Image: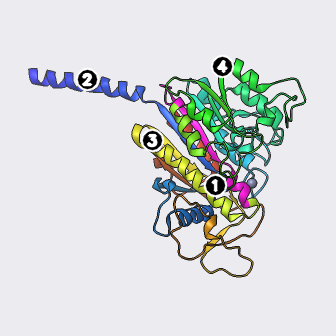
C-alpha cells in the first residue's frame, strides 16, 4: 500500500515537472530565405563549393517539402507576395507587403511575436526595406515605397535589424538620402534605444552578452555581392546571423528571426551564375550558423526556403553554345573547386520562374515538412512552434 502511494507520489511529481518543463520551453523560429534560390541554384552552389559528393549545410535539413509559389494575382510570384505568404499566411498580389489583395493590413508573425514578448529579428543582404524583410514589419501595397517602409519598420521595432539601405533612413542632408522630409530615422532609432552599427568592425566589436536593440545599416543601397566585396567593410551574412542569434538568445520567451540571402535573386536576374553561386554559398554559411545554434539548444525550428526561382536556371555538364561557363577562378576560393570540369549553367529568363521550391526544416515543428505545401502553410507551422494563435 505504502509502495503504491509512493509510486503515485512520484507520478504526480513527474507530471508536475513535465508540465513545468513544457510550459517553460521557449519558442524559437529561424526562417532562412534564399531569394530566387531554386533547386538549380542550390545544386550549382553545392557542386561549386563541395563537389558532386559534398553537402551544403542546408542539406542537413532532412524534413523536406515542395512549396508552391504562385501569388494571388500571378502564377509567377514576386518577393513581396512570396514573403507575405509566410509572414501572414495569406496569398496576396505581387508588389503587396503584408496587406491582402484588397490592400487591408494583415498582421505578421513578427508583430504577433513581438506583442507576445518574443525577441524578433530581420537580417538581409539587400536593403532592410526590400520586399522580403519589409513583408514582416510594414504594410504597404507598393514594395517600392522604401522611404515609407523604413518609417513603418522602425515603428514596428524588430529587436534586431541588419542589412543595407541607409539612404532610406538617413536625413535628407546626407549624401544619397532618398528622404524628402526632415526625419532622421537613424537618430530616431538611437533615441528609441537602438545601438546603430555601420560596418563589419562595429558589428564585431559589440558586446552581445547583454540584451539590446540593434540596427545595422551596412550599405547605402543593397549590400555588395560577396564576389565584389574583397577588402570592403561589410559583414558577411553568417556574421550578421551569428550576432542576431547571440542577441535574441537572451530572450527567455524565445524569438522569431528571418535571415535572407537576398542577392541570389539579383544575380540570377542578370543571369550571372558566378555571383549567384557565391551568394548562395554565403547564404548557406549563414544557415550553418542557424543549424549550429539549433543543435546546441535543441529547441529551435530552422526552416530554409525560397520565395521563388529566378532565371529559369539549369545546371549541366554538357556545355553548348549560348550556355555561359563559369571560370574556375570565379568560384568560392575558401572551399576550393572540387570539380575537374567546368560547370555549365543555362538560363531561360531574366525574370522569376513559376516552379515550386524546396523547404527544408529541422527541430520542433519540422515534422510538418513533407509532401507538397502551399507557401502560406509555413505561417501556421511557425506560429504553432512559437505557441501563438492568429
Ligand atoms: Zn527577383
Of the residues under marks 3 and 1, which one precedes in the sequence? 1
SS label for mark 1: helix
Q: Nearer the viewer, mark 4 or mark 2?
A: 4
Q: Are marks 3 and 1 in contact (CB under 8 Å)?
A: no
Q: Report which residue position mark 4 lands on.
A: 193
Inspect the magenta stretch and tell me whether residue 251 lies in it: yes
Q: Are marks 3 and 4 in contact (CB under 8 Å)?
A: no
Of the residues under marks 2 and 3, which one precedes in the sequence? 2
Of the residues under marks 2 and 1, which one precedes in the sequence? 2
Measure the alpha-carbon separation of dots 3 and 4. Answer: 28 Å
Measure the alpha-carbon separation of dots 1 and 4. Answer: 32 Å
Q: Nearer the viewer, mark 3 or mark 4?
A: 4
Can residue 236 be seen by looking at this rendering? yes
Which label is found at residue 12? 2
Q: Where does residue 231 sit, x and y in percent of width and height? A: 65, 48
Name the foreground residue: 206 vs 92: 206
**Residue at 70%, 43% in the rendered image:** 84
Residue found at the far right of this picture: 180
Residue bounds of the magenta highlight: 247-268
Q: Report which residue position mark 3 lands on.
A: 294
SS label for mark 4: loop
Q: Report which residue position mark 1 lands on.
A: 279
The quarter of the rendered structure image containing the C terminus is: top right
Measure the alpha-carbon separation of dots 4 and 2. Answer: 46 Å
Amino acid at each position: 500500500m505504502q509502495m503504491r502511494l509512493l509510486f503515485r507520489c512520484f507520478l504526480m511529481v513527474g507530471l508536475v515537472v513535465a508540465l513545468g518543463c513544457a510550459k517553460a520551453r521557449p519558442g524559437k523560429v529561424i526562417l532562412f530565405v534564399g531569394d530566387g534560390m531554386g533547386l538549380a541554384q542550390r545544386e550549382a552552389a553545392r557542386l561549386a563549393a563541395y563537389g558532386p559528393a559534398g553537402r551544403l549545410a542546408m542539406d542537413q535539413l532532412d524534413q523536406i517539402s515542395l512549396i508552391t509559389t504562385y501569388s494571388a494575382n500571378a502564377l509567377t510570384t514576386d518577393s513581396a507576395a512570396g514573403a507575405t505568404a509566410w509572414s501572414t499566411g495569406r496569398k496576396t498580389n505581387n508588389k503587396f507587403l503584408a496587406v491582402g489583395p484588397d490592400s487591408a493590413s494583415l498582421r505578421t508573425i513578427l508583430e504577433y511575436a513581438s506583442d507576445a514578448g518574443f525577441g524578433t529579428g530581420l537580417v538581409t543582404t539587400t536593403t532592410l526595406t526590400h520586399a522580403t524583410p519589409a513583408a514582416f514589419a510594414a504594410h504597404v501595397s507598393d514594395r517600392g515605397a522604401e522611404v515609407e517602409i523604413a518609417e513603418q519598420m522602425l515603428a514596428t521595432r524588430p529587436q534586431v535589424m541588419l542589412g543595407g539601405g541607409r539612404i532610406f533612413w538617413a536625413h535628407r542632408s546626407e549624401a544619397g538620402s532618398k528622404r524628402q522630409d526632415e526625419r532622421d530615422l537613424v537618430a530616431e532609432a538611437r533615441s528609441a534605444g537602438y545601438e546603430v552599427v555601420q560596418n563589419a568592425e562595429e558589428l564585431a566589436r559589440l558586446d552581445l552578452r547583454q540584451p539590446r536593440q540593434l540596427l545595422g545599416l551596412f550599405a547605402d543601397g543593397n549590400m555588395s555581392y560577396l564576389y565584389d566585396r574583397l577588402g570592403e567593410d561589410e559583414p558577411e551574412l553568417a556574421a550578421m546571423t551569428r550576432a542576431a542569434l547571440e542577441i535574441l538568445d537572451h530572450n527567455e520567451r524565445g524569438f522569431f528571426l528571418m535571415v535572407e540571402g537576398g542577392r541570389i535573386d539579383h544575380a540570377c536576374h542578370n543571369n550571372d551564375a558566378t555571383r549567384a553561386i557565391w551568394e548562395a554559398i554565403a547564404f548557406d554559411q549563414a544557415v550553418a550558423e542557424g543549424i549550429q545554434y539549433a543543435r546546441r539548444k535543441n529547441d529551435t525550428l530552422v526552416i530554409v526556403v525560397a520565395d521563388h526561382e529566378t532565371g529559369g536556371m539549369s545546371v549541366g555538364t554538357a556545355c553548348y553554345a549560348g550556355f555561359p561557363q563559369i571560370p574556375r577562378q570565379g568560384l568560392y576560393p575558401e572551399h576550393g573547386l572540387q570539380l575537374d570540369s567546368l560547370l555549365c549553367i543555362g538560363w531561360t529568363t531574366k525574370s522569376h520562374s513559376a516552379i515550386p521550391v524546396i523547404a527544408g526544416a529541422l527541430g520542433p515543428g519540422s515534422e510538418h515538412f513533407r509532401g507538397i505545401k502551399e507557401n502560406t502553410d509555413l505561417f501556421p507551422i511557425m506560429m504553432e512552434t512559437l505557441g501563438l494563435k492568429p
